[in-house]
Image (cartoon, helix red, strand yellow):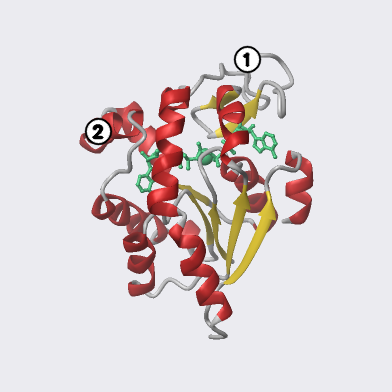
Amino acid sequence: MKLILLGAPGAGKGTQAKYVCEKFAIPQISTGDMLRAAVKAGTPLGLEAKAIMDAGGLVRDDIIIGLVKERIAEADCANGFLFDGFPRTIPQAEAMQAAGVTIDYVVEIDVPDEAIIDRMSGRRVHVASGRTYHVKYNPPKAEGVDDETGEALIQREDDKAETVKKRLDVYHEQTEVLVGFYSKMAAGGDASAPKYVRIDGTQTVDAVRDTL
Ligand code: AP5
Ligand code: ZN
């Protein structure tokens, strides 16, 4: 099973990815998590990516495509994977087609911009696992700590209201076009084309999960 979770920043991709990956026993490939790990480790990629991410921009296509190609060649991806936050531009999507990667489902989690700022300001993250909480909508069992490890939760650098606005602009300018790209492909009737599913992401976390 190969899936793409498509949606604006804060739509709930990371939250739902955890459930879908468990259900299908496939790895979650979050380019955002991979970049944050590189930033934390202080690698050359991390040093280059940090300023771009903090400003809400997109890291260069060639870098991201290289990262993802390396990742999907690993043994645990043999039975499929879930892309979270990738592809994010037409060149990224085309690079996957050119590499012969056939996707089974593209799932769009649809949330209007008005709901996003609220979600981002209350988001708390366990960096090591990528597990995501919300102080109101999806709180951890004990305040400020991860359910499974008991380690501290943090707020992401790019969750400041100004940066979130920029990320939403970038989403509308460069990523939203993928909605048309994949839904047209799905409607084209080609047997190898992905199926396209749109979900109302304004429902509760559990309601969205139940539709997946
Ligand atoms: P990335 O980490 O991918 O960020 P993003 O796409 O902007 O998405 P988020 O992680 O912010 O949101 P999400 O949809 O996962 O929502 P979540 O489940 O956490 O990318 C970060 C940066 O890295 C980019 O800006 C870019 O610079 C770079 N980058 C990454 N990939 C790249 C690529 N392919 N190309 C170029 N650059 C790239 O939920 C959000 C909050 O809402 C949480 O608090 C959660 O608990 C809560 N919540 C979730 N669902 C619900 C619900 N149904 N109701 C109420 N609250 C909910
Ligand atoms: Zn995420």
The tag on residue 201 is none
The tag on residue 43 is 2
The disc, 1 or 2, on the residue closer to the chain's N-terminal end is 2
The residue drawn where x is 42% and y is 23% is 157
Q: Are marks 1 and 2 in contact (CB under 8 Å)?
A: no
The correct choice, above or below, for 192 with respect to 198 in the image is below
The reply, left or right, for residue 206 in relation to residue 28 is right
* Residue toward you, 144 or 11: 11
The residue drawn where x is 22% and y is 35% is 48
The correct choice, above or below, for 200 with respect to 69 in the image is above
The reply, left or right, for residue 121 in relation to residue 30 is right
The reply, left or right, for residue 125 in relation to residue 87 is right
Please tell me whether mark 1 sits on a helix, a strand or a loop. loop
Residue 106 location in percent, x, y?
A: 57, 63
User: Toward which corner of the image does residue 14 lie, by quadrant?
Assistant: top right
Residue 87 location in percent, x, y?
A: 42, 56
Distance, label 1 to label 2, CA atoms, is 28 Å
Question: What is the three-letter code of the residue carrying label 2?
Answer: Thr
Q: Residue furthest front?
A: 114
The correct choice, above or below, for 139 with respect to 94 in the image is above
Residue 29 location in percent, x, y?
A: 48, 50
* Residue toward you, 28 or 74: 28
Please tell me whether mark 2 sits on a helix, a strand or a loop. loop
Asked whether residue 33 appears in the rendered view, the answer is no
Q: Quadrant of the C terminus?
A: bottom right
The residue drawn where x is 34% and y is 72% is 99
Which residue matches tag 1? 144
